[in-house]
Image (cartoon, grey):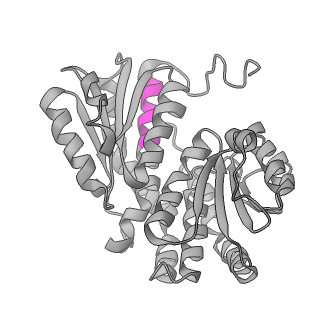
Amino acid sequence: MLKFDESEFVRQIASAVALRPRIEELVDRLVDQGFDNLFLVGAGGTYAQMWPYEHLARRTSTLPVRSAIAAELVAAGDAGLGERSVAVFTSVSGTTEDSVRAIEFCRAKGAYTVGFTGVADSPVARGVDTVLLTEPKTWPFDMQLLLFMGRLLARRGEFEGYEEFADEFAAIPRILVRVAERAEPVASAFAEAHKDTDYHFLIGAGNLWGLTYLYSMCILEEMQWLRTTRVHSAEFFHGSLELLERDTSVLVLQGEDESRPLTDRAIAFARRVSDDVTVFDTRDYPLEGISERFRPLLAPLVLDTVLDRVSKHLERVRDHSLDLRRYYRVMDY
C-alpha cells in the first residue's frame, strides 16, 4: 500500500487500545468520586473528533456532555464549567497552543483535566491532571475516546454489553489493516479520477459528521489546498444543494447508525444532479470479529482509515505533499 507502514500503524493503534485498563481505572475513579458534566475539548481536527462521542452521549445518556472549541471556551467561558466538571483533551504533538490555554483555563475553574497524547514531555502532558500516553504520532483518538465514553456510559447503566465490545475491540489494529487493504484500489481510483478536481462537496451525519468536517477542513483544505463545502445530511436540503452542478464532485460519508436514512436521502438527490457522487460506506468493510450491534460505533475509525488511503493517493497524483503549508504554523496568527 502506498506510504503505509503496517508495523508502525499497528503499533500506534495497539498502544491506544492497550490503555483500556488505565482508562477504565480512571473512569471508575471519576464516577466513584462524582462529577456533574463532561467537556470534550479540542482544536481543529481534535475538536471535530470529539463530536461522535458527544453524539453518543446525547443519544444514550442523561449526563451533560459538550464538545467545545478550546479557544472559544477560554474566550466565552461556560457557566457549567467548575469544580464538578471533567475536561478531556487530545493532541498528537501535545503542543497545540489553544488546547494548552484551555487546560489552564479549565484547571483554574477547578475542573479535573485528562489528556491523551503521544508525547510525554509536552505542554499538554504536563498540564493535565492525568495524562494517558500512546506511541508518538498515534492518530486518530477514537480508540481512547470510545473506551473512555464506553466505560463511562457502562458505569451509568447506559451501555449494555460494554465488556463484550471492549473485548472485541482489542482486535481493531489488525481489522483496520484489512480495511486499509480493501480501500487501497478504491482510493487510488478516486484520486486518479480527481487529479484536477479543485472543488469537493462533502456530506455526512451522525457520528460521521465530525469526520466529514475534519476531512473537508483539515485534509482537503489544509493539506491539499482544495476548495470544499461541507454540510450535514439533515441540512443538505436547506440551501447547500443549490451548489450542485452536473460535474460537482460529491463525497458522502455513510455509516450504520440511526442517521443512515438522512444520508441515503442526500445521496439520492445528489445523484439526480451530479454525475460525480462518491460514497464511502462502512458497510463495504467486513470488520471480522466485531458484532453487528457494535459496528455503528466504529464508523469514524473505519472511514478515517479509508480516507487516509484517499489522502495518500491524492498526494501522489497531485504532486502536493500532505506536509506542505503556506500559513498554518508557518505565519503568526
**Residue 1, can we see it?**
no
| Residue 311 within the segment the image draws in magenta | yes
Point out the image quarter for the N terminus: top left
In this view, 249 is above or below 72? above
In the rendered structure, the answer to whether residue 230 lies left or right of residue 133 reads: left
Q: Is residue 128 left or right of residue 169?
A: right
| 113 relative position to 161: left or right | right
Q: Is residue 148 visible?
A: yes
The residue stretch that appears in magenta = 307-316
Residue 333 position in % (x across, y down): 74, 22
Query: Based on the displayed image, in which of its 4 quarters is residue 295 positioned?
Result: bottom left
Left or right: 122 as drawn, with respect to 162? right
Which residue is depicted at the point 49% across and 71% down? 169
Is 302 in front, or is 252? 252
Asked which quadrant contains residue 201, the reply is top left
**Is residue 68 a member of the stretch shown in magenta?**
no
Q: Residue 92: x percent and y percent?
A: 69, 46
Instruction: Give the camera-side residue of 329 and 135.
Output: 329
- Camera-side residue of 164 and 130: 130
At x 33%, y 61%, the residue is 257
Q: Is residue 183 above or below residue 299?
A: above
